[in-house]
Amino acid sequence: MVLTGPRESGKTTLSRACFPDHEHVNLERLDVREFAETDPKGFLAQHAGPVILDEAQLVPSLFSYLQAKVDDDPTPGRFVLVGSHFGLIKTIGQSLAGRAATLNLLPLSLEETRRFPPETGSSSAEGGRASTDDLWTTVWTGGYPRIHDQQLPAAEWLADYAEAYVQRDVRQAFRATHLPRFVSFMRLAAGRAARELNLSSLGSDVGVAHPTIRVWLSLLEAGFLVFRAPPWRPRLRKRFVKTPKLYFVDSGLACHLLGIRDPDQLRVHPLRGALFESWCASEIIKARAHRGEANRLFHLREVRGLKLDLLVETARHIIAVETMSGATVMFGFPRPLDPFPEHAQHVNPHLSLATRIVHGGNDRLHSRGATEVVPWSAIQDVQWV
């Protein structure tokens, strides 16, 4: 079994909780890593399982020997490999293909952060657990477990997290001279959250070539910091835009990269609508991941006409989603969703259709025609599978 995901998403804690009888071996310790690198057979003889190999990506040479061990004794769960995506998935694909189930652990969803109730009179900016009753505090704080579990100031923790990501993960891939531009790239990418991705424009703003931006973006994706929502059914008609949209997995990190210092600043920030949409998209993919479902998140925009923020496609139906950060849903708001059922039925008459609005208010509103109106605080109650 392989457990991967972004740094500080709780992989070690989860693996030890799920496998309390397994030995835990941390390959980040220099002496342990040196033993595994110089004498892999001896290392695996000493740790023959059941065992959790934490930070397994640090010793890629170990995987070939693991393959032989698994082939000799294929007992499920004997080896649990835990680590970041960098180097781990590629090595597994080469050595343990077909022998290991892979699970991705993302930062906490809204439903999970609510298991950490806020302390009276505290906020995530000052220290203490963040309130999940306020939209902008929730979006600004994000979902990394340590912030909520240890009552840490979100601004300080996210600054340290971004610095550690650049210094530990990105430095492995690039020379130190590239790091300042990569930091600028991350900040500019945050400013493009919930927007169609234009690599040439982003490269021009950063001052690097288009192919470099493509590689850098793949690093953010490999680190589970961002994901893309491709266009829905892009080959059907030429009049539809074929560019993917960019989203951040954690809205708190996006806010930090944009220099948003507290929830009150986010509340009036010009990008609050985009950050809210990015937060909604992330909540949807988390809800699907918790149920063992793949991402399947898309967007749709005609060159002239129909434009939908998000589309969730399943084997049996498709859900069109519009997001609005305001607390008020005007009577005529569902208009962007109105043409979609006719279009989708033309594409596939057997699709079961649903249209939803996720808004920034807390009140449950009456549905507008066939469109379900969902407050942000109830997004986890919606069936996204």
Image (cartoon, rainbow, N blue to C red):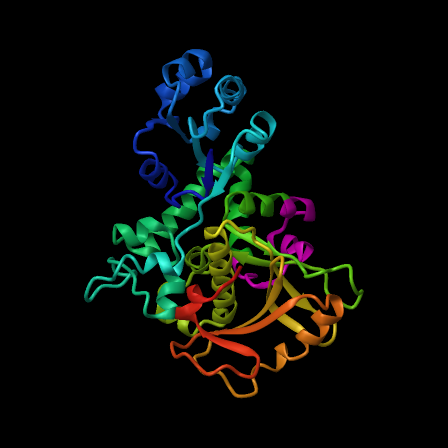
Please say whether residue 188 is visible from this viewpoint: no
List x then y, in percent, for residue 112.
35, 56
Left or right of 333 in this view: 139: left
Magenta span:
190-214
Residue 228 position within the rendered picture, expressed as x and y whole percent measured from the top left: 60, 55
Toward the bottom, the furthest residue is 331
Q: Which of the 4 image quarters holds residue 246?
A: bottom right
Residue 200 included in the magenta stretch of the image: yes
Judging depth in this view, the residue of 10 and 72 nearest the camera is 72
Q: In this rendered view, identify the residue nearer to me: 328 or 312.
A: 312
Q: Within the image, what quadrant is residue 346 found in?
A: bottom right
Q: Residue at x 78, y 68 (%)?
A: 239
Image: 107 above or below 258: above
**Residue placed most toward the observer, 125 or 106:** 106
Is residue 151 visible from the viewing direction of this image? yes
Residue 93 position within the rendered picture, expressed as x and y whole percent measured from the top left: 59, 31
Q: Residue furthest right?
A: 238
Q: Is 159 on the left or on the right of 369, as rendered?
A: left
Q: Residue at x 71, y 71 (%)?
A: 345
Q: Quick check: is 189 in the magenta stretch?
A: no
Measured as percent of width and height from the top left, residue 245 is found at 62, 60
Task: From the viewer's perspective, tell me whether residue 11 is left or right of residue 307.
Answer: left
Taking the spot 41% from the left edge, 77% from the top edge, the residue there is 361
Seen in the picture, residue 325 relative to 38 is either above or below; the reply is below
Q: Which residue occupies the foreground of this view, 42 or 384?
A: 384
- Residue at 48% x, 19% y is 73
